[in-house]
Image: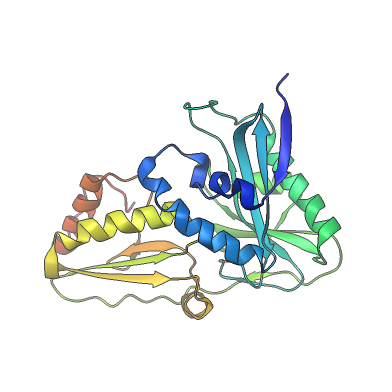
Amino acid sequence: MPLVRLEQLNENNLDIESCCCLTYDQELKKDAETKKKWLRTMMRRGLRGLLLFEDDAPAGFIEYQPISLAPCPATGENLYFINCLMVHIWDLGPGSMQGKGYGRLLVEAAEKDVMENTDAKGIVAWGLDHEFWFMPHTFFQHLGYKVVDSDGPRMLLVKKFAAVPDPSLRPVTFEPELEAGKAAVDFFYSNQCPYRLYQLRRWRKVAEEFDDEVVFREYKTDKKPVMDEFGIKSGLFVNGEEVFAGPMTEEEIRDKISAAINKLDDDFGWGE
């Protein structure tokens, strides 16, 4: 039987937690340094986290903080918010850790930590209404979380330890500024997510290839007024349509921007 243990997030294990998705992508690791600085700042303001190890190999983590400070377009009082939950999925290193109950273990340990070490009366999670492996809302529902608000595929869920008003999502009020003959690319990001920083750099690099045919705008949502204004933590919009900024290659990004300039359907269908 493997030896499974949990560690509280601290200065000694920041290198592990800051590497989004526990990945082996060297390019993404460059953005882990930005995430580490963000973590240090937020840990002084109540952020907590847990890392899970199997036989001393990193197997997953969970990160949570007071909802008033969390990088999320949600409002609430006396609640903690789960920023991210990750269980190792790669074949590299120790191999995939999914299907072992580690996600449940991390969430339940976080709930216990919040109940015993903070004054919060519940935990809020965000989930997505999709079949993708990352943050599916059905996972949290299986653990007793209740959907209290939604916006498209985004769900807001809560598990209460005591009486407290339901949290809610801020409405999305973003309206893109379009210019004739140009592609408009609007990228919302937070230093909380190194994967978004990684994608931002790649989209910016490709967009620069098109010179003045592309209007590229960046919105840093670590600044609460920005998130409050638009109701978005992270997102990518091309000509006003939201695009899934998943693991695109530079060729796919280039195709998407070219199609936006020419008002054509892109070959890869990322906007569908």
Residue appearing at x 66%, y 34% in the figure: 53
Q: Tell me: residue 227, above or below residue 244.
A: below
27 or 217, which is in the foreground? 27
Residue 194 percent coordinates (x, y): 45, 54
Residue 54 percent coordinates (x, y): 66, 29
Residue appearing at x 70%, y 48% in the figure: 141
Q: How many marks?
A: 0
Is residue 240 shown left or right of residue 120? left
Is residue 129 shown left or right of residue 198? right
Q: Is residue 214 visible?
A: yes
Q: Image quadrant of residue 139? A: top right
In the image as oriented, which residue stretches furthest toward the front? 12
Residue 64 percent coordinates (x, y): 66, 57
Q: How was the colour assigned to the protein in this rendering?
A: rainbow
Q: Image quadrant of residue 175? A: bottom left
Residue appearing at x 50%, y 70% in the figure: 222
Residue 239 percent coordinates (x, y): 27, 67
Q: Image quadrant of residue 7? A: top right
Is residue 80 shown left or right of residue 84? right
Residue appearing at x 23%, y 57% in the figure: 205
In the image as oriented, which residue stretches furthest toward the top? 1
